[in-house]
Image: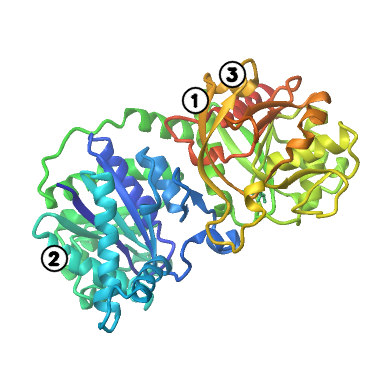
Amino acid sequence: MTKFIFITGGVVSSLGKGIIGASLGKLLRSRGFTVSIQKFDPYINVDPGTMSPFQHGEVFVTDDGAETDLDLGHYERFIDTNFSQLSNVTSGSVYQTVIQKERKGDYLGATVQVIPHITNEIKSRIVKAQKHFNPDFQIIEIGGTIGDIESLPFIEAIRQFKAEQGIGNAINIHCTLLPYLQTSGELKTKPSQHSVTVLRSYGLQPEILVCRTAKPIPKTEKDKLALFCSVAKEAVIECRDMKSIYEVPLALEEQNFAQVVLKLLQIPDRKAELTKWKSLVEKINHPERTIKIAIAGKYTKLSDAYISVVEDVKHDGDADNVKTEIKWINSEECIDAESCKELLKDVSGVIVPGGFGVRGIEGKLNVIRYVRENNVPFLGICLGMQCAVTEFARNVAGLNNANSTEFDENTQYPVVDLMLEQKNVKGYGGTMRLGAYNCTLKKGTKAYGMYGETKISERHRHRYEVNTEYIDTLKKSGLVFSGMSPDGMLAEVIELPNLDWFVACQFHPEFKSRPERPHPLFKGLVDAAIKRNVK
Ligand code: GLN
């Protein structure tokens, strides 16, 4: 029987509820339990696919092609389980279903209302995910901050759902912030107390409080929180700021977080197997040396826009006891070879990540030309691969001014073009080539060398692709197509065999990399970068 764990947040937004939920998932997984998650987002967009990365950070793509909140990436990495389109629920998608039903006449005669129609739809999403994954524990994180008007239907739905589950089958973990007052040297509990008061006014009593804090919480303050918020003393958990998010599960384990959860849900505790995770954290905190990997992109002011790439780069050096640091490079500043040389002088490897729109493209092409001509290890992802092909076409294959039709519709050499299946697509929501597709790797290539198998499956999110008409021309000039779709029609991986590591892929490897199982293509880049190791 599945037990349900709801996670709410109070006091401020961006509390790290996702990391706290993912850490709890990790602690339960490490005890051999199965865990699935759901993220409820109160905004009206049907999914985050149409939102700017500047506003909402990365769009995480699941195997089944859902465009989801970036927290799902943390959950997949921590829990090491693939989630699905059932795992992200937005107000927009809930309202869309209810309105569609109303138009079809499903509620004929009834006045369709937030309660019960919207709340029932929210509850049915919980049940659908539960039926699909049938986990021991289902963690459900409600986005936003308690008190927000937007999240009220979700809070009401979980209030009902929790009561319906009966004693010991569903709990609410409330995450808050304890602000530190420098002048008096005190951590303040009042905002947390108030946020629990608001939660209670909606009929929800939290069983556990997880308090974000910059300083250790004195016992007196913990006891005070327990007393005023009506939770057991052992259920006031401190979540101190950490150097790395991978430390959070271990810090929570030390305070018996999972044990408290299990006790409340009436499940006997088991021994946790965290050896591998501990050594990962140890290597992140005490590396033998550090190398820098550059990410040359457009959204460099907001690292959340590339969060999966960032996390994968960070944990992929660990195997070699090397810390991989990121150097952000705004591709618009890469105006020529000189500027690239200056900007890249202290890096051991370069990533050109995915993206949309023409801004910064010529700079990315300059960066790629520089790394190709100077044998700097390089990984191109999605748009990064399209740029690598364009650069090669222009500067090696002699196709002057070759371009992607995304950036120049009238280019003489459209080496990257809209996919056939995309030509008649109208509208923007969920219409790209999305989710997992198979790819066949060519034996003897660098990509194959890292994967060690010919049949792979990776996640996609794009509308454009390498134009098949140019594949032969590019091949003749030395570009190797190391991965193709199984029907041989779509270019999925390219590489230059004479360079140490110059590999680019149409898919997004960052969505499948896991801290305890680095992705072959990131590993290939980091291995080559370690060998190069610019001081
Ligand atoms: N803009 C490109 C496309 O639509 C690349 C997309 C991406 O990098 N995710 O194909």
Tell us which disc is closer to us: 1 or 3. 3
Q: Residue 343: name its quadrant.
A: top right
* Ligand 1 closer than 8 Å to label 3 CB: no
Measure the alpha-carbon separation of dots 3 and 2: 54 Å
* Ligand 1 closer than 8 Å to label 2 CB: no
Q: Residues within 10 Å of mark 3 (few under 14, many from 20)?
A: some
Measure the alpha-carbon separation of dots 1 and 3: 18 Å
Reading the image, the residue beneath label 1 is: 319
Q: Is residue 402 above or below residue 472?
A: below
Give coordinates of residue 174: x percent, y percent.
27, 62
* Closest to the observer, 136 or 333: 136
Reading the image, the residue beneath label 2 is: 163
Mark closest to the chain's N terminus, 3 or 2? 2
Q: Judging from the image, what secondary structure is the residue with disc 3 in?
A: helix
Is residue 449 visible to us here?
yes
Check the image and name the residue furthest to the top: 444
Mark closest to the chain's N terminus, 1 or 3? 1
Q: Residues within 10 Å of mark 1 (few under 14, many from 20)?
A: some
Reading the image, the residue beneath label 3 is: 449
The mark found on residue 463 in the picture is none
Q: Judging from the image, what secondary structure is the residue with disc 1 in?
A: helix
Q: Is residue 393 above or below residue 451?
A: below
Give coordinates of residue 104: x percent, y percent.
35, 73
Q: Is residue 435 above or below residue 480?
A: below
Left or right of 176 in this view: 409: right
Left or right of 199 in this view: 269: left
Amino acid residing under circle 2: Ala
Taking the spot 38% from the left edge, 64% from the top edge, the residue there is: 185
Taking the spot 62% from the left edge, 58% from the top edge, the residue there is: 425
